[in-house]
Amino acid sequence: MYASIHLMPETLLVVDDDPAARFALARVFEKDYRVVEADSVAAGRACFAAERPDVILLDYNLPGEDGLVLLREVAETPAPPAVVMITAHGSERIAVESMKAGAYDYLAKPYDVEEVRLVVSRALERQRLRTEVNTLRERLAGEGQFGRMIGMCQTMRDLFLQASRVAETELPVLLLGESGTGKDLLAQEIHARSARARQRFVAFNCAAVPETLVESELFGYVKGAFTGATNSRPGRFELAQGGTLFLDEIGDMAPATQAKILRAAESGMIERLGDARAVHVNVRIISATNQDLQAAVQQARFRQDLYYRLAGVTLHLPPLRLRREDIPLLVEMFWEELRRRYDRPGPELTREALLSLEAASWPGNVRQLRNAVERLFVLARQDRVGKEDVAAALASGPVTTAPNADLLDAGDYREARRLFEIAYITQKLREHNGNVTRTAAAIGLERQSLQEKIKQLGIERE
C-alpha cells in the first residue's frame, strides 16, 4: 500500500449554530488539524465548496434547513468527505436516517471529548485509506483493468478512467453498447467502487419480463392487489434501498412504466401495486441499452425527460470488432479462468488459433468470444488447438453472414424472398439473443409485425 503524503494539515469543517459548541470543537482539534467553522447549512455549503474538508462535524438542528440537507448534497459529490452527524440525545431515528443518507457516524449530545476524538480519528483514517485505494484503482484503470474487465486499447482505458471517476459520485449512469460488450460487468464495478458498495446491487432486465409484470417486479405489490397476490412483496426499488438499481435493456420499457420510473427517479417515492401509500426509496440508478435512445426519443418510443434523467453520465462500450488488439488479452484471461474452473491445464492454444480468433467478426462481442473459447477448451480432441478447431467452434456459434446459395436456386421470386426473410430474421434474432423487441427495433419493424412474421415463416427462436 502506498503511504499518503499530506502537504497540508487535514481540514475539519464544524457546522453548528451554537458558538460555544464550535469553539469547544475547534479547541479540541486545532493543534492537529485545520478547523473551519460555519453556523448554518448555507454557510456550510459555501465552506465545503471553498475548503473541500476531509471530515465534517455536522449538527442536525440548524436554523432554516436541517443538517440532513447538507449531508445529502455532500454525499452526491465526487470523493465525498466523511460526515459525522451530531444529534440531540434520544434522536435515534435521526441517527439512523443520517446513516442511510451517507453519514460515516453520529454523536449524541452531550458527547465526551475522547469519544469525538476517536470518531474523527477513525473517519480520517478511512478517508486516507479510500484515497489510497482510489489512487491505485485509477492507476489500474489507466493500465487497462477495471474489476473483471480488461482492455489495453486506448478506448477501453479512457472508458475505465471515466467509470472510475463516475463511481465516486451519485450521478445516474447510462451505459450504451451492443449486446455482449460487458455493460452488466461495468455496472457492477461502478457500484463496487461507490459509497453504496456496502448495500445491495439489484439488477433487473426490462426485456426479460412480460410487460404486464414489469410494474409489479419493479415497485412490488400488497396482498390482494391482483388475483394470486396472496402475500405482499417488495419490488426491485425497495430491495435496492441504499444501494444501486441496474436497469438493463431500458430501451425496451413500455411508456406507462417509463413514467413511473421517472417519478421514482425524481421524487424518490414509489407506490406498490394496490397500495395508495408512497414509500421513500434511496437508490442510484444505472441503466443500459443496446438501442439508440436518442433516436427512440425522436420517434416518441422513449420519454425525453426520462432519457435526460437517466443520462447523468453516458458511457459508451465499444464493440469487440473495434478493439481487436484486446482479443489476445481476453482469450488469455478466459483460458486461465477455465484452467482454474476445470482444474486441469487444458490444451495448448496455438498462434494460428489465436490469429483466427483475432480475425473473426464477433457480432456477439465479448460474450460470444468467451463462449467460443470455452468450447475450444472443453471440446478439443488433441493437446493443441489449431485454426481448424477455431473454424469448427465458430461454425457452431451464431451465424455472421446470411447464406445466399439457396436464394439463387429458388424456383421463383416469392420463394427467394421467403428464404431471404428466413435467413435475415434468423440472423438478426441471433444477434439480439432471440429478443423480439430488440430485433424489431433494430430492423425497423413493429414488435407485433415481427412476431407474426416469425410465426408465418416457421422460424424457431434459440
Image (cartoon, rainbow, N blue to C red):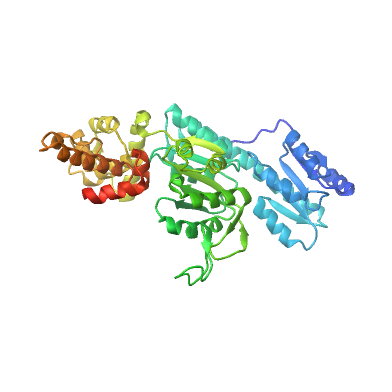
**Where does the N terminus fall, quadrant-wise?**
top right
Q: Position of residue 289 (x, y in %)?
A: 44, 42
Horizontal and vertical percent position of residue 391: 20, 36
The residue at 41%/33% (across/down) is: 318
User: Looking at the image, which is closer to me, 35 or 229?
Assistant: 229
Q: For this rendering, which residue is in front, 413 or 59?
A: 413
In the image, residue 441 above or below residue 100: above
Identity of the residue drawn at 72% across and 57% down: 95
> Along the horizontal axis of the image, is 221 left or right of 81?
left
| Residue depicted at 77% across the width and 51% down the height | 66
Q: How many marks?
A: 0
Counting from the top left corner in percent of width and height, residue 74 is at 69, 43
Residue 55 location in percent, x, y?
Answer: 72, 43
Residue 245 visible here: yes
Residue 383 visible? The answer is no
Q: Is residue 418 left or right of residue 189?
A: left
Identify which residue, 461 or 84, lies in the foreground: 461
Displayed quadrant of residue 372: top left
Residue 399 placement: quadrant:
top left
